[in-house]
Image (cartoon, rainbow, N blue to C red):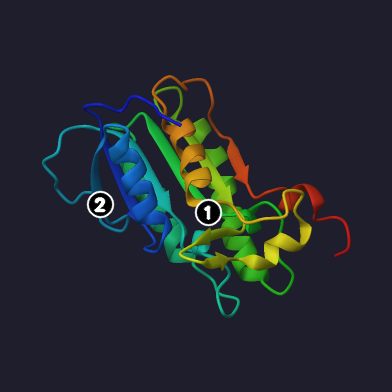
């Protein structure tokens, strides 16, 4: 997928991992000047011009943690960064785990944290519209460097394979597209059918 981001600044922050560089490369390949930011310090100066899109990547998008965890500080940082930058950006895209739409057994706190990001997407879309469109991408299993992140999600998918990084970044691009101005408050679920099939064979 290709969109026109020529001359536009894209701010990217949040969790490190394989998704972050893939998002960087995809935005740059579509003409954007990509700038790293720290969501905990959204007022840090940068000299790249006015941003058009803000992409924030949750740690949950990197896969299930080894143990159930609470990442409340991430939610607060994301909300603060979005509100702080809202007067300057036109698009916000959150990236988090599909556990935010359908919870994972044994990961109550993690699932609740990711669900909070889905709720934040809807809430901030209403709060910041019409000048800013706030949407999200929720990711299921995906393959990177021969490793499948959150392979557990494959047990209830219709597609029966992990996503590629390009399939995830294509969804992010769609939501960042300057021509996509009427979609807001939506979570685009890139999970191969995890949410659709989860009710079977729990």
**Which residue is painted at 25% across and 26% down in the image?**
6
**Which residue is painted at 59% across and 40% down in the image?**
187
Query: Which numbered tag is attached to residue 36?
Result: 2
Q: Count of labels shown?
A: 2
Q: Badge 1 is on which residue? A: 96
Q: Position of residue 28 (x, y in %)?
A: 28, 39
> Residue 42: in sight, yes or no?
no
Tell me if mark 1 has few (under 14), some (14-19) or many (20+) residues whose alpha carbon lies within 10 angstroms of its own. Answer: many
SS label for mark 1: strand
Q: Position of residue 154 (x, y in %)?
A: 71, 61
Q: CA distance from mark 2 to mark 1?
A: 18 Å
For marks 2 and 1 on the same chain, the one whose residue lies earlier in the sequence? 2
Query: Which numbered tag is attached to residue 147?
Result: none
**Which residue is painted at 52% across and 31% down in the image?**
126
Compared to residue 58, the image places residue 122 above or below, namely: above
- Residue ranking furthest to the front: 146
Tell me if mark 2 has few (under 14), some (14-19) or many (20+) residues whose alpha carbon lies within 10 angstroms of its own. Answer: some
Compared to residue 122, the image places residue 13 above or below, namely: below
Compared to residue 189, the image places residue 75 above or below, namely: below
Q: Position of residue 171 (x, y in %)?
A: 51, 38
């Amino acid at each position: 997928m290709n969109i026109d981001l020529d001359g536009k600044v894209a701010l990217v922050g949040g969790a490190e991992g394989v998704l972050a560089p893939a998002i960087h490369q995809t935005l740059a390949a579509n003409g954007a000047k990509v700038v790293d930011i720290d969501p905990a310090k959204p007022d840090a100066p940068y000299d790249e011009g006015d941003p058009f899109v803000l992409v924030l990547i949750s740690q949950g998008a990197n896969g299930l943690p080894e143990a159930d965890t609470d990442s409340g500080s991430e939610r607060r940082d994301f909300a603060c960064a979005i509100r702080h930058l809202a007067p300057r950006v036109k698009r916000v895209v959150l990236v988090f785990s599909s556990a935010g739409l359908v919870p994972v057994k044994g990961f109550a706190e993690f699932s609740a944290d990711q669900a909070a990001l889905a709720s934040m997407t809807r809430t901030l879309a209403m709060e910041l519209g019409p000048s800013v469109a706030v949407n999200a991408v929720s990711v299921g299993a995906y393959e990177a460097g021969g490793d499948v992140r959150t392979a557990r999600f494959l047990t209830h998918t219709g597609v029966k394979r992990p996503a590629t990084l390009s399939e995830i970044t294509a969804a992010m691009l769609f939501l960042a597209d300057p021509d996509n101005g009427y979609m807001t408050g939506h979570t685009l679920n890139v999970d191969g059918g995890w949410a659709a099939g989860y009710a079977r064979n729990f």
